[in-house]
Image: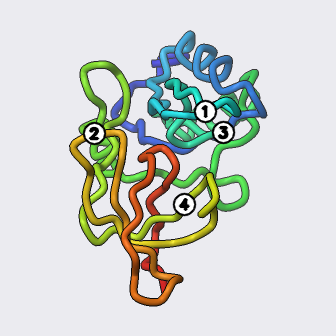
């Protein structure tokens, strides 16, 4: 509740933050008692020396969800430090369905991070580093050493199997050709 406005007219909206100000924007909204959701993930990254470490990153970089009464507060929200704009058409904020936000909230584990989907056999993948960088293939299975995976390369005749470090690939949104 801000300025006495009840939450019965509150809906979820997507708010774009200014560059590198997502934490500031979220803190400012929370000071006004605006409910926020800024889902984060833990990503495994490799340094140039090949050392792996976890990095905390936003699930939607530069954006967060905020629940408020747009009719009463959209103007104030837009002027909040750290906020660039409320997503919508023109001056009208576009509400996000509660089920979409609930789906994201349901995927947040006890540690506070969004659980990502495990790769499944048949998932399209792209190799992101190493001598086979930019090659695409199909995920087959993890090896007994859980940090390694076997993929079938699709760009080479006969679809050879390749064992590669799991952090060197990413799941693609569409199937390889």
Q: Is residue 163 above or below residue 98?
A: below
* Earlier residue among tags 3 and 4: 3
Q: For the residue carrying disc 4, how many other residues have a C-alpha within 10 Å: few (<14), some (14-19), or many (20+)? A: many
In this rendering, does residue 68 appear at all? no
Asked whether disc 1 touches disc 2, contact meaning CB atoms under 8 Å apart, the reply is no
Residue 83 located left or right of residue 37 = right
Q: Secondary structure at mark 2?
A: loop
What residue is shown with label 1? 50
- Mark 2 → mark 4, Cα distance in angstroms: 19 Å
Q: Position of residue 9 (x, y in %)?
A: 40, 38
Query: Nearer the viewer's eye, disc 2 or disc 4?
Result: 2
Q: Of 55 and 131, which appears nearest the observer?
A: 131
- Mark 1 → mark 2, Cα distance in angstroms: 17 Å
Residue 75 located left or right of residue 159 = right
What residue is shown with label 2? 145
Q: In which quarter of the view is residue 122 placed? A: bottom left
Residue pictured at 59% horizontal, 63% vertical: 132
Residue 17 located left or right of residue 97 = right
Q: Position of residue 21 (x, y in %)?
A: 72, 25
Q: For the residue carrying disc 3, how many other residues have a C-alpha within 10 Å: few (<14), some (14-19), or many (20+)? A: some
* Earlier residue among tags 1 and 2: 1
Q: Of 25 and 170, which appears nearest the observer?
A: 170
Q: Secondary structure at mark 4?
A: strand
Q: Is residue 131 above or below residue 112?
A: below
Q: Secondary structure at mark 3?
A: loop
* Earlier residue among tags 2 and 4: 4
What residue is shown with label 3? 62
């Amino acid at each position: 509740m801000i300025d006495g406005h009840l939450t019965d007219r509150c809906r979820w909206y997507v708010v774009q933050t200014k560059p590198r100000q997502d934490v500031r924007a979220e803190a400012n909204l929370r000071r006004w008692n605006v409910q926020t959701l800024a889902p984060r993930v833990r990503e495994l990254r490799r340094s140039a020396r090949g050392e792996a470490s976890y990095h905390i990153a936003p699930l939607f970089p530069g954006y967060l969800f905020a629940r408020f009464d747009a009719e009463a507060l959209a103007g104030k929200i837009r002027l909040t430090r750290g906020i660039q704009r409320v997503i919508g058409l023109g001056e009208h904020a576009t509400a996000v369905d509660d089920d979409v936000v609930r789906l994201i909230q349901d995927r947040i584990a006890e540690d506070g991070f969004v659980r990502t989907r495990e790769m499944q056999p048949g998932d399209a993948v792209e190799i992101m580093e190493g001598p086979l960088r930019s090659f695409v293939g199909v995920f087959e299975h993890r090896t007994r050493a859980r940090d390694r995976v076997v993929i079938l390369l699709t760009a080479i005749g006969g679809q050879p199997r390749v064992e590669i470090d799991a952090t060197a690939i990413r799941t693609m949104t569409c199937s390889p050709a």
